[in-house]
Image (cartoon, rainbow, N blue to C red):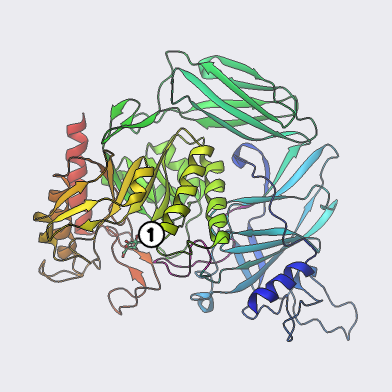
Amino acid sequence: MRRYFLLLLLGWLAGGAQAQPDPLIINVDGRRTTSLHGSWAAIVDPFDVGYRTYRNTPSGNSFFRHRRPQHPADRIEYSFEDAPRLEVPGDWNSQRLELFFYEGTVWYQRTFTYRLPADRRLFLYFGAANYEAIVALNGQVLGRHEGGFTPFNFEITELVHDGENDLVVYVNNRRRAEGVPTDNMDWWNYGGLTRRVLLVETPRTFVRDYFVQLDPADPSFLTGWVQLDGPERTLTVTLRLPELGLVQTIRPDTSGRGTFRLRVPERLERWSPEHPRRYRVELATRYETVVDSIGFRTIETRGTELLLNGRPIFLRGISIHEEAPFEGRRAFSKEDARVLLGWARELGCNFVRLAHYPHNEAMVRTAEAMGLLVWAEIPVYWTIQWENPHTLELARQQLRELITRDKNRAAVILWSVANETPRGEARLRFLRTLIDEARRLDPTRLVTAALEHRYVNDTTIVIDDELGRYLDVLGNNEYIGWYDGPPEKARRVVWQNAYDKPLIMSEWGGGAKAGFHGPAEQIWTEEYQARLYREQIAMLRRIPFLVGMSPWILKDFRSPRRPLARIQDYWNRKGVISDRGQRKQAFYVLQAFYRELAQSAI
Ligand code: GCB
């Protein structure tokens, strides 16, 4: 029934809501943009009256039409003009108490004025909307996007009016069994226009996308491609790296795609955590110059080693959710990123796992500027619908959008395709498709996943998940001392690896309420968590094929799965920093270990 209704709805929207977003424009920071941030009208619509009638048929008075009464007797039972308002960017849960647990529809609306010159194009760009968004401009539906953590854009060149324009966005964050993520996860399902919303103005023909990296096969060369969009697809593009004195002319083919390969001078300084050097990169046509800041490095494996710029590296990491410091809301700003990543630096990290979904672009760019290596991930989490082709397509689309956005970031070394997924044939097929896709889109990085392990006997654990065959780097989550026995169990455990590949312990940890003190045997105390950290560290030191770790987690984060009153109160308390920014004892245990590792690495 539900499906039937959906089909009907999609049909009624006359193709509009079925329409996919246009191909993604990358590096919007390097373009001419207008912010649509600020206060938007927001109608909370738990029963979707904005698009369906009491007979469950599509409503002729959909909110996309944004009608206003013309006569005193006009009955229009909604009003954007008088609706309460929400800040954009921002999740709705943290902005209004009654929306704290809300999962459903909110209709956003605002106006903007614009004058688009005749030779220019205009796009509406969303950093992300969780989970499903349908966008309408001046009463016309542009299309729909599914997936709460990746960007999308629609071209509005032909629809935008000279002067005032009316923008309506339907956002629905209902959890869905067939979705990515599915309906069961350990984080807050923050809904809304959670990231930036921009107008992006371009020339008729413009540089939509590009990839500029060292050639992994021979890093004395820079290779890549540029993708033009528009009528003049064979327009000449000039690639310039002024600090290196490099200039290259690129001649795209009739599909707008042009490739290049050029030798880099000896003096090129590689990007690394110690020296996060980035170069100005310009891509110019006769109509525009797109400027980016790109670092160059190599990443590869050799047996169980991980090599950055040809040298073995140990990843001193921490896992992070995209939640703001000091408060329970989605993070979206540069300032949020600076604080969160600043804490990681204070810990002594050279690596962050941005769990469990693509974080906002400011996080990745700030990590790159600070010299933090990044594990980037899509929300293929726990038990999703492995047999469902729609689910696979969704996962693939999100992976594509993530890689498209971040493929020029030197900080990103790992694409992770899954977290704690159950072994089985259908899952293997599903994830292999994603791994192939990641390699096809980006041959310069390594592919990983956070796996689970198997006890061979009481004390021997083996990582032998068949997915390991297809990954470059193994990730493994383990909770010895929390879900899996007491912390001291770690003393007896021996880890085995079925593959000649490096391992990152992508999660381990336990909960503590900041300020709660007591004996180290007492669960939820800072002392218990610190004890667990000491035991874990002693164990991890003994694993020869270990190349890094990202303990769970930097900061306490909101989760509906954590109802224990007075301790959790809907926060997952495994942070080494509390939701208010207090460092727990475990923070200092980890910091001391990372300082020691950093010293010995010199
Ligand atoms: C896990 C999950 C993570 C959870 C964590 C926990 O294994 O990957 O998302 O939040 O455990 O705290 O239980």
Q: Establish if 15 lies above or below 335.
A: below
Q: Which residues are magenta?
A: 178-197
Q: Residue at the spot x=16%, y=59% of the render?
A: 532
Residue beneath the point at 46% across and 55% down: 357
Q: Quadrant of the N terminus?
A: bottom right
Residue at 51% x, 61% y is: 180
Query: Considering the image in quadrants, where does the C terminus appear?
Result: top left
Q: Position of residue 43 (x, y in %)?
A: 66, 74
Residue 164 is one of the magenta-drawn residues: no
Residue located farthest toward the right when viewing the structure as drawn: 71
Q: Is residue 446 left or right of residue 231?
A: left
As rendered, which of 517 and 475 lies closer to the eye? 475
Task: Write down which quadrant ligand 1 falls in.
Answer: bottom left
Residue 182 within the magenta-colored segment of the rendering? yes
Q: Which one is nearer the viewer's eye here, 539 or 94?
A: 539
The correct choice, above or below, for 540 with respect to 410 in the image is below
User: In the image, is residue 160 above or below residue 565?
Assistant: above
Residue 78 in picture, x, y percent from top left:
74, 79
Q: Tell me which residue sits at (38%, 51%) in the image.
A: 340
Asked which secondary structure carries label 1, the reply is loop
Q: Residue 531: x and y, percent? A: 13, 59
Residue that label 1 marks: 424
Of 87 and 54, the residue lying toward us:
54
- Under mark 1, the amino acid is Gly
Residue 324 visible from this viewpoint: no
